[in-house]
Image (cartoon, rainbow, N blue to C red):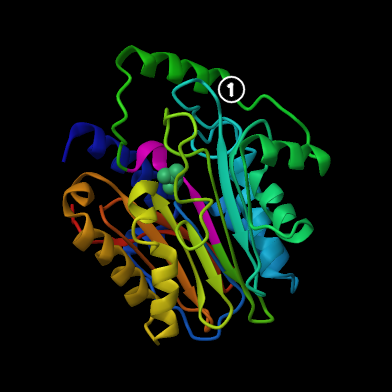
């Protein structure tokens, strides 16, 4: 393991373990939560602030759709989160361009891609779903729609992100860093007390990407997929690999065929490893999966993928099992 990766692992999991004895003890492994323990919300990475925001809605009998939107808005508004929303690293030309999607229990979906200047792309995606006959709006059209809906135009490029971009320009390398900055995309999925599922996904995408690049996060079935007959899944990591195997859709289809969420997560990740073995050696994909019974699963290509789970009034972070080990 390289020094950088070792450092990142220590930074992430050192803090997790300190704040969470259950994490250290390895308790509550994926999929071992009791059947029927609803509501439940799970997010990629240690996004416990996001699951907490979602829980405020779920515990009071609120709708999973409202919960996942509220959860995704937390990192979107955090200037210290350099891979989602405000504070996200820009593309190679210095533009912060955001991708997001959302899906509800009725099978409705909304998505925005390459959206600039709007802090909460997840809420714009929801407006696309609820206020238009379309599923996806991109670029200038998405921005115009957001402004028409009353969203505020803002500068999302923080000083920190600008400095990182200036530094990147010296070498201009695209190589993604595994488990970069603790996480990249937030994918957040939930089941409410009424046993309805919803999911959301939001990101500023690959740091210093080509202008116009779209990853998996706004693509329904890639970065996230929800089906109220089966369950819901969301992904994080290098979007190009997720796009080529429709990872979230695949996991939900596994649920439909009767798989436990942990098996569904593992099979979806295995498809990536089988189809792109060389890319998989050097890149990270993580997935979280929930089924209709409130059971969950999580799995990743590389070690170091964390997820946050709020269930039974407890908000905890765990490290997922992975194909490659430490
Ligand atoms: N998973 C985020 C991206 O690749 O854009």
The image position of residue 301, as x and y in percent, is 26, 56
The image position of residue 252, as x and y in percent, is 45, 74
Question: Is residue 184 shown to the viewer in this render?
Answer: no
Tell me the quarter of the image containing the N terminus.
top left
The image position of residue 222, as x and y in percent, is 45, 59
Q: Is residue 80 above or below residue 186?
A: above
Q: Is residue 273 above or below residue 8?
A: below
| Residue 310 located left or right of residue 65 | left
Residue in the foreground of this view, choosing between 311 and 203: 203
Quadrant for residue 300, please give it.
bottom left
| Residue 71 located left or right of residue 90 | right
| Residue located 32% across and 76% down the image | 263
| Residue located 74% across and 70% down the image | 62
Ligand 1, by image quadrant, is top left
Residue in the foreground of this view, choosing between 174 and 69: 174
Verify whether residue 287 appears in magenta.
no
Q: Which residue is mark 1?
A: 158
Question: Is residue 79 shown to the viewer in this render?
Answer: yes
Quadrant for residue 228, please give it.
bottom right
The image position of residue 112, as x and y in percent, is 61, 47
First to last magenta residue range: 179-188
Q: Is residue 78 above or below residue 190?
A: above
Q: Secondary structure at mark 1?
A: loop
Q: Residues within 10 Å of mark 1 (few under 14, many from 20)?
A: some
Q: Is residue 2 above or below residue 155?
A: below
């Amino acid at each position: 393991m390289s020094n950088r990766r070792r450092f990142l692992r220590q930074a992430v999991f050192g803090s997790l373990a300190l704040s969470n004895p259950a994490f250290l003890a390895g308790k509550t492994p994926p999929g071992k939560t009791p059947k029927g323990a609803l509501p439940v919300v799970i997010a990629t990475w240690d996004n416990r602030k996001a699951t907490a925001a979602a829980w405020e809605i779920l515990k009071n009998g609120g709708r999973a759709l409202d919960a996942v939107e509220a959860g995704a808005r937390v990192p979107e508004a955090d200037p210290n989160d350099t891979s989602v929303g405000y504070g996200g690293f820009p593309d190679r030309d210095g533009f912060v361009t955001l991708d997001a999607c959302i899906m509800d229990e009725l099978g409705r979906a909304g998505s925005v891609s390459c959206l600039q200047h709007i802090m909460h792309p997840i809420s714009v995606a929801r407006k696309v779903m609820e206020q238009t006959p379309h599923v996806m709006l991109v670029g200038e059209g998405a921005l115009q729609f957001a402004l028409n809906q009353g969203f505020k135009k803002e500068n999302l490029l923080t000083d920190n992100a600008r400095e990182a971009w200036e530094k990147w320009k010296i070498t201009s390398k695209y190589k993604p860093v595994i488990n970069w900055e603790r996480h990249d995309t937030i994918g957040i999925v939930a089941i409410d007390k009424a046993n309805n599922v919803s999911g959301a996904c939001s990101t500023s995408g690959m740091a210093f990407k080509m202008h116009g690049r779209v990853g998996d996060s706004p693509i329904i079935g890639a970065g996230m997929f929800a089906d109220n007959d089966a369950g819901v899944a969301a992904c994080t990591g290098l979007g190009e690999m997720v796009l080529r195997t429709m990872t979230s859709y695949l996991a939900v289809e596994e649920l439909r065929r009767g798989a436990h969420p942990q098996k569904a997560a593992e099979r979806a990740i295995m498809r990536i490893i089988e189809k792109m073995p060389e890319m998989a050696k050097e890149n990270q994909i993580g997935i979280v999966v929930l089924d209709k019974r409130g059971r969950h699963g999580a799995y990743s290509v590389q070690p170091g993928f964390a997820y946050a789970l709020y269930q039974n009034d407890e908000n905890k972070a765990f490290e997922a099992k992975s194909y490659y080990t430490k």
